[in-house]
Structures are given as C-alpha cells and as structure tokens.
Image (cartoon, rainbow, N blue to C red):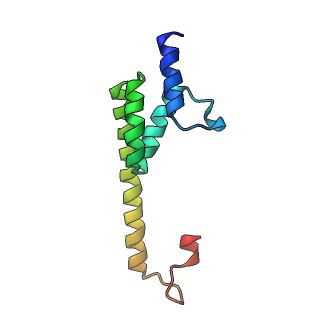
Amino acid sequence: MDQDSKQNSEIKDDCLQGDELGILAVPTKALVEIGAAAALNCHTCLHHLIPAALNNGILAEEVSAALAVAGEIRTRAAAVTDSLGATLVNRNERHPNGNIPDEICG
C-alpha cells in the first residue's frame, strides 16, 4: 500500500461514516467535517477532526481555509439571527396566550 492510500485509509477510519458521503474524496470529506464542526461550534469534534486531518496529510493551510469558511458562515448566520430578533422585538410580536407565535417555531 503506497503512502497516499495508507493516509486516505487512516483518514477514512477516523471520520464519520455514511454511505451518502462515499462520493466525496476522503480529504474533501475531512475538510467538510471540520468546517461543519466549526460552524456548529463543536469543540469536541474539532479536537478529534483537526489532529486526525493533519496527521493524515491534509495541509494546515487547507484546514485553516475550512475554518475560515466556517467562521464566515457563523458570522453571517449570527447577523441574520440578530436582525430577526430585533425585528420581532420592534414589532412586539406576541401570541394571544403570550407564547412565541407558531409560525416562528414551526
């Protein structure tokens, strides 16, 4: 087994499993996992995923790029959430019984 195959095998063993993810190349899947974990603020996931990626041949620059994308998503999502909150407060949205309107929470 060549070094690249060995590294890909080790990464695959370390990462989440799922048939629907089989189409992604192993390094791509690892970077997606890191980005998703960072976007969701999953510290436990990052403690596992980042060292595994770095130990298996993914470049630090690639991991940093995935983290940067996640940070941008978090920033934009937070801004939208803050705006929604302010809009609802300014409209003084209330349900007749004092609860959150059903259309907001589903």
Asked if residue 35 shows in the view, the reply is yes
Residue 19 placement, left or right of 9 = right
What residue appears at the point 65 percent right and 37 percent down from the top-left corner? 20
What residue do we see at 48% from left, 15% from top? 4
Work out which residue is located at the far right of the displayed protein and give it: 19
Residue 50, placed above or below residue 105: above
Residue 55, quarter of picture? top left
Residue 69 seen from this side: no
Q: Name the spot of residue 42 as percent of width and height, x first.
A: 41, 49
Q: Which residue occupies the extreme bottom position in the image? A: 97
Residue shown at the point (62%, 29%) measured from the top left: 23
- Image location of residue 103, percent across then percent down: 58, 73
* 2, 80: nearer the viewer: 2
Of residues 42 and 90, which is closer to you in this image? 42
- Residue 85 rendering spot, x and y as whole percentages: 40, 70
Decide which of 19, 69 is in the foreground and name it. 19
Q: Total number of numbered labels?
A: 0
Q: Quadrant of the C terminus?
A: bottom right
Question: Which corner quadrant holds the N terminus?
Answer: top right
Percent across and percent down for residue 51 are: 37, 32
